[in-house]
Amino acid sequence: MKLFDPQASALIAIDMQRSVASHDAAPHSAADVIARIALLADAARQAGGLPVFVRTSFLPDESDAPNRVLDGPGLKPAARVPGWDELLPDMKRRATEPVIIKRSFNAFYGSDLDLQLRRHGIRSVIMAGISTNFGVEGTARGAYDHGYTIIFAGDAMAASTTVMHEASLNNIFPYIGRIRSTGQIVDAFSQ
């Protein structure tokens, strides 16, 4: 049985932007995750699939950022340097590949991600990016709710700690999709 139909599949690359390239990442380094996602994007292109790049961005004063009352410390962004939210050149994005801006953990919320996927005839999504337990998991839950088949590129994602990464990989993802390696997904794109 085929893992997915390459021409009806999209790679959803979460936060492949300048600020993430220097993040602490585990169990895979940010550099390894970036390289694997670039490989997945190339495989998707060659097979007629759709790379979709999701990036976090806000207005300069961040007045459009979520402002929540939390028990925990929340996620405190590092100082924003110019270009922090620009896509990494490693992704080799083409002008025909959508870029979705997210302002929360779920890239479907408040964006046209679902519309873009449906207009391109997408039925399956391959999830990858940083961070496993925030942007990847949040967006995957949205994909599940929207009825997409989900494949997780388990070695093309990372979190700030291995424990956080493995919590999503072992306790959440098996209930909403299938987990495969970058190599298995690249092979599936070529079938």
Image: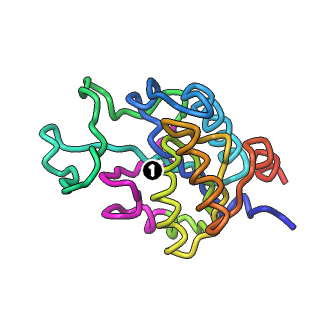
Residue drawn at x 78%, y 41% as measured from the top left = 183
Query: Would you name the residue on which mark 1 appears?
Result: 135
SS majority, magenta: loop
Residue drawn at x 24%, y 26% as measured from the top left = 79
In the image, residue 184 lies at what x, y percent? 80, 47
In the image, residue 78 lies at what x, y percent? 28, 29
Residue drawn at x 27%, y 44% as measured from the top left = 73
- Which region of the structure is painted magenta? 93-116
* Number of disc labels: 1
Q: Is residue 112 magenta?
A: yes
In this view, which residue lies farthest toward the right? 1
In this view, which residue lies farthest toward the front? 71
| Snapshot quadrant of residue 91 | top right
Can you say whether 169 is above or below 19 in the image? below
Towards the viewer: 110 or 96:
110
Q: Secondary structure at mark 1?
A: helix
In the image, residue 181 lies at what x, y percent? 75, 45
Residue 96 at least partly seen: no
In the image, residue 8 lies at what x, y percent? 66, 64
